[in-house]
Image: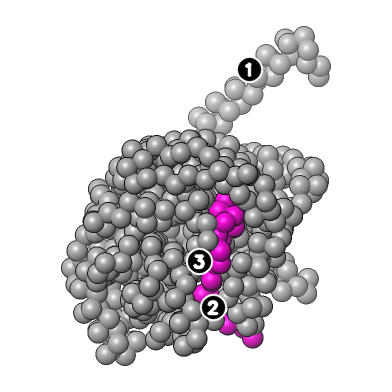
Amino acid sequence: MVIQRRATSSQVNSGIVAMSAIPHANGTAASASAIAEFYDSKTVFITGGTGFMGKVLLEKLLRSCPGVSKIYLLIRPKRGQEAQERLQQLLSSPLFDVIRKERPADLSKVLPIEGDITQPELAISVADRATLSRTVNVVFHSAATVKFDEKLKLSVTINVLGTQRLVELCKRMTNLQALIHVSTAYCNCDRSEVKEMVYPPTISPDQIVSLVDALDEDLVDQLTPKLVGNRPNTYTFTKALAECWLKDNRGDLPLVIVRPSIVLSSMDGPLKGWVDNWNGPTGILAAAGKGLFRTMLCQKDKVADLVPVDMVINLMVTSAWWVATSKPSDLPIYNCVTGMRKPVTWNNFIQLGFNYFRVHPLSGVAWYPNGTVTSWKSVNVINRCVLQLIPAYVLDAVTWLTGGKPRMVKIQDKLTKAATCLEYFTTHEWRFDDENVRKLSLTLSEVDRKEFCFDVEKINWETYIEAYVLGIRRFIFKEDSSTIPKARKHMSLLYWTYRLVQLIGVLVTWHFVFLRYAPLQRLWSNALKVLLHLARTLPFIQF
């Protein structure tokens, strides 16, 4: 017999949650979790479920909230694939291996809703809208364009209009208990200190929507720099607009805004280091591991506000439980960040990345992974030409002469574009307040604090970055751990080749620059004589 107890509102607010047992889908009992218990028999709707964070959210709900009834995913037909096909492809990811092995029937809880965030009514059929309106209890809105250089017209369509259309649908949901909107900590990056509040933009969301709707795209592109202002890109600008619109138009919706900083691979289960895209630092670090990226514009002592994806998801799942059970009158906002409580500098992050790519090298590395960090734009341009572009042109020339297809220069162009998009974030620093996140953590029982951990103080950056590198190796490059010994032999060869090239470079520089002057020639000759004399006197060296 399984005993269940519901925590009262006062118990939840004081962080006291009854310890009991709840049934899993397979009939076994587990220690009580107020959060997992909340999701019992609930129906969830997720936008952005096919994205990086959406997949982790879906897996977490299935694994840690086994009583969840149904999970609807908004999926856009793409490249000839219907929504159902895309769903099956998504569920075949290694991320869902634990679910497939332990509770395969739970995968049938996930159902596709064909639609498109850029279209009116989200392009959801009348029948599906009726189903969602009648059955959904929790909505997670993570659909967004995360391209920093996206055109403003499309960015507004997805990040602002898409949010407005979702809210219209949510207001028709008769049993809705929580709506979680995923924003970004950098939507207010024009401020050095960012609190957990909505800051009014210089121009209203409705004005921007009307503007991009009325004007030709080329004209919008010309106006974009003035409209975006001090923000570095359209992504952060439109995310700020969406927050402002939500604050003014949420009505009585049970809304929560979660703002993660730079999201990287998972820290814990089910797969440590899991990552499935090249976005942000991941693509740059992967290229560095291949020996293709060797210079970066960066204020090395600035804090890199990086956060594991599973901690963001745990906060999202928890905040839905919190808003549904506590019913706050204000708008809860959570900055999911690490800079205040568990900071790591860009220099430490980069150096740890290089170190672990030498310990766990990739196969077919082009050159020994190493690089330089500089805060001078001119120096970075010179380094990029000498260390990246010139070798790329040389390799492409050799490839072309041998009948191959040159591609290194194109790769370097892509890397330069990606690095340029990151430069604003690697040369600035922010103080993100996260007091609301701390307070939310205090409301959790020990069981929930462990199962839905978002306490960033528990991050060990060395251990985490090692797992991150191994994750890039396994999930991005699809390389098995059995290839590491062979890759290490290749890395050893590259290391000594790299040192030899450095030595030759020093000798050539010395010969052509310094030895042209007679005093330096005599100094060099005398130094060699002294070194040879000392060497002969050492008993363990034979000449």
**Residue 519 in picture, x, y percent from top left:** 50, 29
Question: Is 61 part of what is drawn in magenta?
Answer: yes
In the image, taking residue 346 as reference, residue 357 lies left or right, namely right
Estimate the x, y position of residue 517 in percent, counting from the top left: 51, 36
Mark 3 or mark 2: which is in front? Answer: 3
Question: At numbered mark 2, what does the secondary structure look like: helix, strand or loop?
Answer: strand
Q: Is residue 317 visible in this depiction of the protein?
A: yes
Residue 439 screen position, x and y as percent = 33, 41
Picture coordinates of residue 465, whole percent (x, y)? 56, 42
324 lies above or below 542? below
Please tell me whether mark 3 or mark 1 is closer to you in this view: 3
Q: Mark 3 points at which residue?
A: 43
Name the residue: 57% across, 47% down: 22
Q: What residue type is labelled 3?
A: Thr
Cα separation between marks 1 and 2: 80 Å
- 484 above or below 93? above
Look at label 1 and name its amino acid: Val
- As measured in the structure, the alpha-carbon distance from the residue carrying label 3 to the one carrying label 1 is 82 Å
Residue placed under numbered mark 1 in the picture: 530
Q: What stretch is highlighted in magenta?
A: 58-80
Question: Which residue is identified by label 2?
Answer: 113
Circle 3/circle 1 CB separation < 8 Å: no
